Amino acid sequence: MGVAHRAHRGRPLLALLALLPLAACSPYADAERDVDAGGRGLAKLNPAPKQAYELVLTLKDAPGPFAIVEGVAQYDASNYADCGRILPATGTAGRITSQESFTLRKIGENEYRGTFYLDRMLDEDYYGRGACHWTLTGVGAMLRATTGEADTRFLTFVDKKRMDTGSQLTRYYPRADYPRIEEITGYGASGKEDPSSYRADLRDALFSTTTTVQKLMP
């Protein structure tokens, strides 16, 4: 089970990220209650992060305005098998993970920028088995037409490997999914990298997000 699943107030940004809660049993029950209330449990933020990066999100042919545009950085304890709590049911340690949101500022009509940090999480010993070492898994964004939970969540995510190569990511989404799909509440639309993979009748009715990540000089 995870030590630092940060609940995002009932609306996870990235549908593909399965975050795990803290153990309910003592002595970790208080930490799980904190997670349930929107906290990060036992995990703490680095009070003085230094490894800053910038995410640049560019929209093209957007179907309308977006009231919510949020950034999120995903962190995992790389050595969770050695530092995590042993689960009685399996005899092994569970994954330790956290999502940390950051602000995306609107710079132009179709551009947003925000700063996140590789060293945002503080390495600590949570279970008496040695310090857990946090690493960035990836970074992304969520866009939604309004604050209504029923609206489609348009998602994009750049993993750390792609981030390190400096390669930008463009994903395409059907304009018809904006602002919502009536039959599906809060649908998470991950889009596709190849617009030709959509049906022919949709290919001329797409919009895109392009995500670029760059290191900021100190």
Image: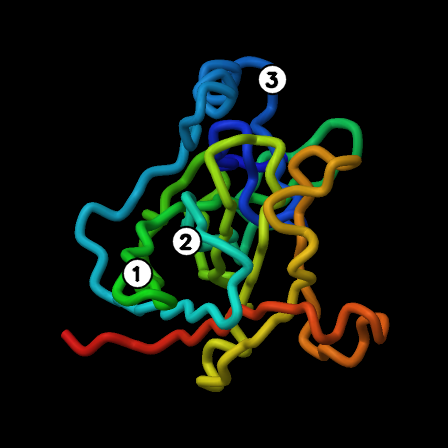
Q: Does label 1 or label 2 sit earlier along the sequence?
A: 2
Circle 2: is it few (<14), some (14-19), or many (20+) Cα within 10 Å? many
Q: How is the image coloured?
A: rainbow
Asked if residue 25 is positioned above or below residue 166 in the image, the reply reads above
The residue nearer to you, when weighing 131 against 10, is 10
Please report contact status of discs 1 and 2: CB closer than 8 Å, yes or no: yes
Q: Identify residue type, mark 2.
A: Gly
Q: What residue occupies the far left of the structure in this picture? A: 218
Residue located beneath label 1 in the image:
114
Query: Is residue 90 placed above or below 15 in the rendered structure?
Result: above
Q: Nearer the viewer, mark 2 or mark 3?
A: 2
Image location of residue 15, percent across then percent down: 65, 47
Name the kind of residue labelled 3 in the image: Ala
Which corner quadrant holds the N terminus?
Answer: top right
Image point (49%, 72%), residue name: 60
Any mark on residue 24, and which?
Answer: 3
Horizontally, is 80 left or right of 44 in the view? right
Which label's residue is closer to the chain start, 2 or 3?
3
180 left or right, relative to 114? right
Tell me if 167 is positioned left or right of 182 in this view.
Answer: left
Q: Position of residue 32 (x, y in %)?
A: 51, 21
Q: Identify which residue, 183 or 114, lies in the foreground.
A: 183
Residue for badge 2? 71
For the residue carrying disc 1, how many other residues have a C-alpha within 10 Å: few (<14), some (14-19), or many (20+)?
Answer: some
Three-letter residue code for mark 1: Gly
